[in-house]
Amino acid sequence: MAEYDNLCKILAEKYPLDFIRWLLNQEPRKIEILKTELSIEPIRADSVTFLQTENRILHLEFQTTIKSQKPISLRMLDYYVRLTRKYEVPITQVVIFLQETSDEIAFTEEYVSEVTTHRYRVIRMWEQDSALFLSNLALLPLAPLTRTDSPQTLLSQVAQKIAKIPDIETRQNTAAYTEILAGLKFEQDLILQLLREETMQESVIYQYILHKEALKYTIRLVNRRFGKIDSVIIERLQVLSPEQLESLGEECLDFSNVSDLVAWLEQKTNN
């Protein structure tokens, strides 16, 4: 599920002003995306985004699954302390749950211990008014996850909005973002029917995410088959296309040892 969280991180960092307007209701003069190195190894960093305005940091976490190595509430306290220590400005923390759940973690907005209470905001996408998201290009890919009495009608409205985007590259990328996030709620056939498969497949970002997920799966499969593989082999896997990675995943089961894998890579990369 990490691809959904990471895609939202991409959106927030591509359109920081729109996310600031939505979540802070501010019009900042400047915004900086913090690529911060906090003094202790982060508990979890993949889908964390820090946006700094003139007088505040917006800390965003996107959540698909409700399972976590460390409780989300503890993680928010941990980041709050470290951000405050480093930047000494007010911090607004928002956890955005993407996929509908009744689990109490999505309805918890504070960390409580014997001596400490720490509060943060929680947004449940399935409770949000779709109008805001339908009217904003940056937030449009999140629109399929918002509140509706007719999910198919909502997805159709999103598709119509995307079709009207004049810039081809922006239209392709927005369609790709939307297709991926809509997968949390809709059947793939319906998504492709409404959003047009060829538009998404031409998108650079779609291809990038597709390749990243295929690579991650293949490395996991190869490690499980042969034990931890070295970095040289990983580098050679990185240049394979998603189709080649899929083919390797199938053929890997017939390999006896790592040398068979290396021979297969030699053949594919030298052709």
Image (spheres, rainbow, N blue to C red):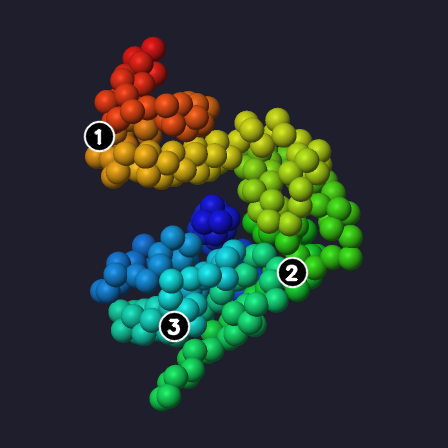
Q: Amino acid at mark 3?
A: Leu
Which secondary structure lies at badge 3? helix
Residue 42's spot in the image, x, y percent?
30, 61
Residue at x 43% of width, y 34% of height? 214
Q: Where residue 155 sits in the image (x, y, percent)?
A: 71, 45
Q: Residue 79, how many percent across, how many down?
A: 34, 68
Q: Badge 1 local density, few (<14 within 10 Å), some, or many (20+)? A: few
Which residue lies at the image location 31% right of the left edge and 18% below the top edge?
Answer: 264
Q: Crowdedness of circle 3 by 10 Å Cα count: few (<14), some, many (20+)?
A: some
Q: Which residue is mark 2?
A: 126
Give whichever of discs 3 and 2 has the lower sequence position: 3
What type is the residue that disc 2 sits on?
Trp
Q: Nearer the viewer, residue 33 or 110?
A: 110
| Disc marking residue 74 | 3
Q: Which mark is residue 232?
A: 1
User: Distance from label 2 to label 1 (Cα)?
Assistant: 44 Å
Mark 1: amino acid = Val
Does 260 sit left or right of 134 as displayed? left
Q: Which residue of the protein is positioned furthest toward the top in this rendering?
A: 271
Q: Earlier in the sequence, mark 2 or mark 1?
A: 2
Sequence-earlier tag: 3 or 1: 3
